[in-house]
Image (cartoon, rainbow, N blue to C red):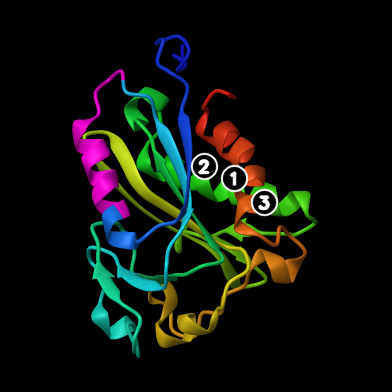
């Protein structure tokens, strides 16, 4: 018999809209939250954008960083290879107690992907996931990237969904470690055209796929 968040009398998840936030201080804040949380701490979902930055996963090869130029590079502790963040991309950091949510890491990643796929479907966009290459794709082009870290049963890092940004910096890397991988974004596909609109539309899908209560 499953146990819900409500059964455990844990506060409903707190949703934060952080606007344009620098990458490294946000990463450190996620680490602190995860290190300090207890069994009764409410989960949080952070919606934000980052200024231009390339980030490398813990085991990423720098050979995939082709020509960063003037864009900063940050080595992080998430999974995955190299990706780009910039204004116009919705970044979602679900800080979830996976043990309490009864989610394994693979199930958690799949839940993030499903939320994006379901949002895309609302706008007539046929998107899909690939088990061998986490993320969400539309006709072979990558719409969203996923990279997570789990410590003490708590998740951090998360999802980057292309909404309406300059995709040119992706040409300076092998996105997610794949040479020649092309990117796409919702604004070009008939979906939400602003990060704020996208965050509001994505939230109920995330709550459903992660098994979190409605507000």
210 relative to 40, above or below: below
The part of the image, by quadrant, that contains residue 185 is bottom right
Q: Is mark 1 on a helix, strand or loop?
A: helix
Could you tell me residue 130's position as x and y percent?
53, 60
> Closer to the camera: disc 1 or disc 3?
3
Could you tell me residue 158's position as x and y percent?
41, 51
Q: Distance between the residues labelled 2 and 1?
A: 6 Å
Q: Which label belongs to residue 197?
A: 3
The answer to which of 119 and 30 lies nearer the viewer is 30
Judging by the rendered image, the residue that carries numbered circle 2 is: 111
Q: Would residue 72 appear left or right of 200 to someone viewing this image?
A: left
Q: What residue lies at 27% left-to-right and 20% top-to-bottom?
A: 39
Badge 3 local density, few (<14 within 10 Å), some, or many (20+)? Answer: few
Judging by the rendered image, the residue that carries numbered circle 1 is: 115
Q: Please, what is the dominant secondary structure of the magenta stretch?
A: helix
The residue sitting at the right extreme is 124
């Amino acid at each position: 018999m499953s146990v819900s968040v409500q059964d455990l009398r844990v506060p409903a998840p707190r949703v934060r809209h952080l606007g344009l936030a620098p990458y490294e201080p946000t990463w450190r804040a996620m680490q602190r939250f995860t290190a300090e949380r207890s069994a009764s701490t409410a989960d949080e979902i952070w919606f934000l954008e980052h200024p231009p930055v390339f980030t490398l996963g813990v085991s990423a090869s720098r050979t995939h960083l082709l020509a960063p130029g003037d864009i900063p590079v940050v080595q992080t502790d998430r999974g995955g290879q190299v990706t780009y963040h910039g204004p116009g991309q919705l970044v979602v950091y679900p800080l979830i107690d996976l043990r309490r949510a009864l989610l394994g890491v693979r199930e958690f990643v799949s839940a993030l992907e499903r939320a994006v796929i379901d949002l895309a479907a609302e706008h007539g966009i046929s998107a899909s996931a690939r088990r061998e290459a986490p993320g969400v794709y539309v006709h072979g082009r990558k719409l969203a990237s996923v990279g997570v870290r789990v410590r003490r049963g708590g998740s951090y890092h998360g999802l980057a969904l292309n909404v309406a940004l300059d995709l040119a910096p992706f040409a300076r890397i092998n996105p997610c470690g794949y040479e020649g991988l092309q990117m796409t974004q919702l604004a070009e596909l008939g979906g939400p055209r602003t990060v704020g609109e996208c965050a509001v539309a994505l939230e109920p899908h995330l709550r459903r796929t992660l098994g979190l209560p409605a507000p």
